[in-house]
Image (cartoon, rainbow, N blue to C red):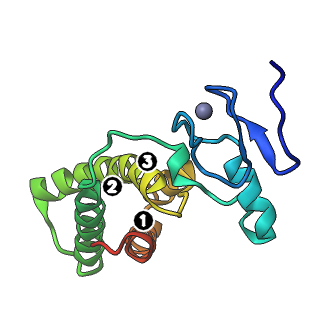
Amino acid sequence: MTKQKGADEVFCRSCGEAIKEASELCPNCGVRNDNYRSAGGRRSGASAGAHDPAQYETTVADTWWYGVAAGTGVWVLLVLASALNGDLGAAGGLLVLVGWVGLPLSVFFDSKYVRANSEWDPQTVVWVILTALWFVNIVAGAAYLYRRHQVLGEP
Ligand SMILES: [Zn+2]
């Protein structure tokens, strides 16, 4: 039997049933319709090529932003200390290590979480570089947390 489909229909990639292009799921087998996204893109040109978090899966925890916040705080402390010519001694060296490794690392993991759970698609490489740069990282860390708050409502 040859299956017939209408102009606004596509064949389900799973069961082969003719389904409405605009339907997100196949009513016959429940598998996601591959053409659904492109149909949405045509409805409003602005959303064409928009980031779709459903495309991404991640097992990254949602708690990495604590590291981003802590790392940014560490850098504020370090910059303040150097501005005041304060000597943090061994603690200062440890804080530099924590800040320099912890902040970009936290951003690296958290951006994966954000990408899979919000409309924002953070450029991981860019943010990791920004949060690894002296002084810039404070602004970058704050900006990252602010943007994250906008799209996720937390922290
Ligand atoms: Zn199907």
User: Looking at the image, which residue sits at the far top?
Assistant: 1
In depth, the one of 92 and 29 nearer the eye is: 29
Alpha carbon separation for disc pair 3 and 1: 19 Å
In depth, the one of 67 and 54 nearer the eye is: 54
Q: Quadrant of residue 82?
A: bottom left
Q: Which quadrant is home to the N terminus?
A: top right
Which residue carries the number 1 mark? 137
Camera-side mark, 2 or 3: 3
Residue drawn at x 30%, y 72% as measured from the top left: 154
**In the shown orientation, is residue 76 left or right of residue 26?**
left
The amino acid marked with disc number 2 is Leu
Q: Which quadrant is home to the C terminus?
A: bottom left
- Where residue 50 sits: x, y (%)? 67, 60
Circle number at residue 112: 3
Residue drawn at x 22%, y 74% as measured from the top left: 81
State the SS at label 1. helix
Which residue carries the number 2 mark? 103
CB under 8 Å between discs 1 and 2: yes
The answer to whether residue 30 is above or below residue 103 is above
- Where residue 117 sits: x, y (%)? 42, 56
In depth, the one of 22 and 155 nearer the eye is: 22
The answer to whether residue 146 is above or below residue 56 is below
State the SS at label 2. helix
Residue drawn at x 39%, y 41% as measured from the top left: 58
Going from the N terminus, do you reach mark 2 or mark 3 first? Answer: 2
**In the shown orientation, is residue 117 left or right of residue 65?**
right
State the SS at label 3. helix
